Amino acid sequence: MITPRYRASTSPILIGLLAAILLALIALIVVVAMPRQENAPAQAASRPSLKTAGPGDTVSRQDLTDAGYHPNTPSKAIDTGRIQETYRPGAHYHVLLKAALKSRASLKDWGIIQDMNLNYAGEAEVFRTIETNDGTTMVETREFRRVRNLSLFCGLDDVRLDIGPVGDFLLGALEGWADIPPGVLMSLDGTSLKTVLDNIPALKQWTDQIYTDSAAKGIAYIDDLQGKKVRIRYQNGQGVVELTPIDCSLTPDEQSFFFDTACISDPYLFPNLDSKEGDSWTINGADLMPLIDPSLKSTVTGKLTVRRGKNVGDATHPAASLRLEEGVLDLQSTDEKSETRGHWEPRGDLIYSFADRVVTQANLGGTFVIDTHSTDHILFEARQTVEPVYQITYSCEVVP
């Protein structure tokens, strides 16, 4: 049975249920970063008014400021020469991110508490094209070809997703299987759930057990961003200053999301190309803020330590290994329906290609703690406290 649930952008109960899941899209940390000032305030509880931008409409940073939004700026300006050599006009960047999350989740919804095992798989495919770049102003188009996820709730303890090799798609079973409108969750149970599980290699060995679990259910979700393409004008030291939707519309939350998006995260991650093995440096954790659903706005504070490892690759494709090894990030998000607080300790390895001038691979893991509760219930609240274990892979290919 396939049952439409509710739009992710409007349901307070959904926010409580999927807060950790949406945050698992942190895997776009390398190219699609969302830098925020260390002292940036949380979004106001009452949303200001801002019109939806239609195809071809140009929205400026001043437009958001006039409407009461507060776009954030990068931590610092980057050397113009470094920006020019990193993001070359005419270059295309194909980004694929996959995230898997396993957690014991306790959901309190309308006075009923349920403890279940949560397995989540998400993936995003983004295609960037650099149109112009003089080191001070960069214009790029960004297309979100896939932004989708699948959540599986069941009573089985041994079920665990393996997201597979870097660069391979994980959720191909959702393509063409059901007409899932962007922004609407589809509840899966019975035969529909078994059909999906049978077509996901990472879950196939548990299909029969999950299918016979009376408490098991799945939720498939296609994000509103999927299929959208936007032209972004980025100013060094100022952030995104202008955007234009291409053959699509952008909601006010999506506009705000894009104005918080950075385009030059690679130089932040590896600022000194002449560093030696064992050298370390500190970066603002806000410079790693991920691509997340625009309905969940987070302010991020904290710092992370990056250490350079051994050189890898070969003479034709030299590269440097980097490692996130210290630091804790604090996340806070507040709107008219929910409040989210989280602590994230990202750990893992990244590969920086000297030929491509960008991070081409990343593997992250660890745990984070998120507590979300609704703020618009009079008698009850929907609350979820999770301590998930996650695995993330990221790849970026420079396409001629």
Image (spheres, rainbow, N blue to C red):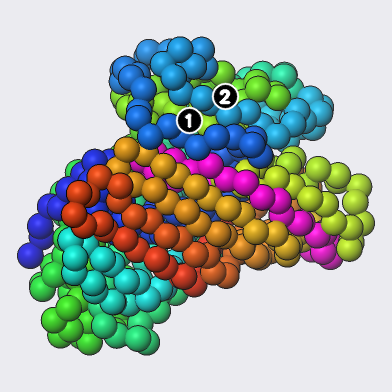
Judge whether residue 196 is colored magenta: no
For badge 1, the amino acid type reads Phe
| Residue for point 39% across, 66% down | 385
Using the rendered view, name the quadrant where residue 237 is placed: top right
| Residue for point 70% across, 59% down | 327
Dot 2 crowding, Cα within 10 Å, few <14, some 14–19, many 20+? many
For badge 2, the amino acid type reads Val
Residue 177, x across and y down, in percent: 19, 57
Judge from the rendering whether residue 54 lies leftward or rightward of residue 212; answer left or right. right
Residue 373, x across and y down, in percent: 34, 55
| Residue for point 20% across, 76% down | 216
Residue 211, relative to residue 273: is it above or below? below
Residue 259, relative to residue 345: is it above or below? above
Using the rendered view, name the quadrant where residue 276 is placed: bottom right
Q: Which mark is residue 240?
A: 2
Q: Which mark is residue 258?
A: 1
Judge whether residue 296 is colored magenta: yes
| Contact? badges 2 and 1 (CB < 8 Å) | yes
Q: Please say whether residue 210 is visible from this viewpoint.
A: yes
- Give the structural element (helix, strand or loop) at label 2: strand
Judge from the rendering whether residue 124 lies leftward or rightward of residue 373; answer left or right. right
Residue 398, x across and y down, in percent: 61, 43
Distance between mark 2 and mark 1 Cα atoms: 7 Å
Dot 1 crowding, Cα within 10 Å, few <14, some 14–19, many 20+? many
